[in-house]
Amino acid sequence: MTTRPPRVVAVTAHHHMNLLDLSGPLQALATVNRQVEPGQRYDVHVVSADGGAITTGCGLQVHTDTFASLRGQRIDTLIVPGGCAGSRFEAPAALARWIGETASSVRRVASVCTGAFVLAQAGLLAGRRAATHWHWVEQLRARHPDVLVDADRIFIKDGPIWTSAGVSAGIDLTLALIEEDLGHRLAIETARELVVFVKRAGGQSQFSVPLTAQASGDARFTDLHAWMAAHLRHDLRVDVLAERAGMSPRTFARTYASNVGRTPAKTVDAMRLEAACRALEETALPIKTVAATAGYADEQALRRAFQRRLGVSPGDYRTRFSRHALD
């Protein structure tokens, strides 16, 4: 039987790039390579315009081959990491030019973080939906108004072009590429080896709720958020929280919204949803028990919250994201 040659993956590199934009996809590909037959493996090359040592943004140097070293090889997937030295992303001209010249012969092209700027400069994102790091969204929109930038998505596939959000989202993207090539089971097994979710629920804006809420500068709310997260099964109405914070309900509601950027009720809802998601991902508890543990009145209340916020049932969520799906 003829063995299929490995898929050639070219990962570009440039000075001041984000190390994790590079190492995250590389590790995911290396992890899946250990699990599959030779004909299913990825043949990965890290390349740059001039080859040799590339100094990443954190100061670590990475050895690269030249773009020319891939001449004559059929590149299956091209991954473009991001990262730069200053507050304005400037794609190296030689990099953007090579990507523009190479893309037509590549099955798919993907970017991580501000790598989307490189794809845009290469002319690959015009009229397409694209993702990038949340901090760089407005700059990408301003510089490339023909790109349909989605500020929340972890990654987006638009035809043969894949783009992803900031830094660690490169791992999410690579797992999706692996799933497309080799199937859901291998993607899950790779995610488990990396100790990450094969698919994150929500988008860039859905950071850990208690951590994000504690960005408020008011120490009373920092303590309050910690208490709320530990007492999700309790009555967490405004008057209860106000008493805990030492304020009248009206003053508390107004001050809280001003400092945190959302109402207390929305924070409670988000904390309970996050707790339910974590329980579904990490335990085999019955859904009824998950609902009670996360502070929902009953199982139906949990189901309504999942449909409203995530568009799936708790059972479907567990099937997609839980490590117990393989057990």
Image: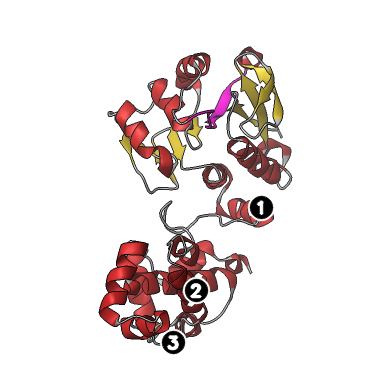
Residue 74 at x, y = what percent?
A: 58, 21
Magenta region: 72-86
What number is the disc on residue 73?
A: none
Which mark's residue is nearer the viewer, 1 or 3? 3
Query: Which element type, helix, strand or loop, lies under badge 2?
Result: helix
| Spatial CA span between label 3 and label 2 | 16 Å
Three-letter amino acid code at disc 1? Leu
Residue 264 at x, y = what percent?
A: 34, 73
Three-letter amino acid code at disc 2? Asp
Three-letter amino acid code at disc 3? His
Residue closest to the eye, 83 or 8: 83
Magenta span main SS = loop
What number is the disc on residue 194?
A: 1
Disc with the residue nearer the chain's start (2 vs 1): 1
Question: Residue 170, relative to residue 299: is it above or below?
Answer: above
Residue 265 at x, y = what percent?
A: 33, 74
Q: Which residue is mark 3?
A: 234
Which mark's residue is nearer the viewer, 3 or 2? 2
Query: Residue placed at 27% from the left, 70% from the top?
Result: 254
For residue 234, which quarter of the picture? bottom left
Q: Is residue 25 visible?
A: yes
Q: Is residue 286 magenta?
A: no
Query: Residue placed at 32% from the left, 33% from the top?
Result: 141
Residue closest to the eye, 155 or 142: 142
Query: Which element type, helix, strand or loop, lies under badge 3?
Result: loop
| Spatial CA span between label 1 and label 3 | 35 Å
Q: Which residue is mark 2?
A: 223
Other-residue count near label 1 (Cα within 10 Å), few / some / many at <14 / 14–19 / ≥20: some
Disc with the residue nearer the chain's start (3 vs 2): 2
Q: Name the image quarter holding the N terminus.
A: top right
Contact flag, marks 2 and 1 (Cβ < 8 Å): no
Disc with the residue nearer the chain's start (1 vs 3): 1
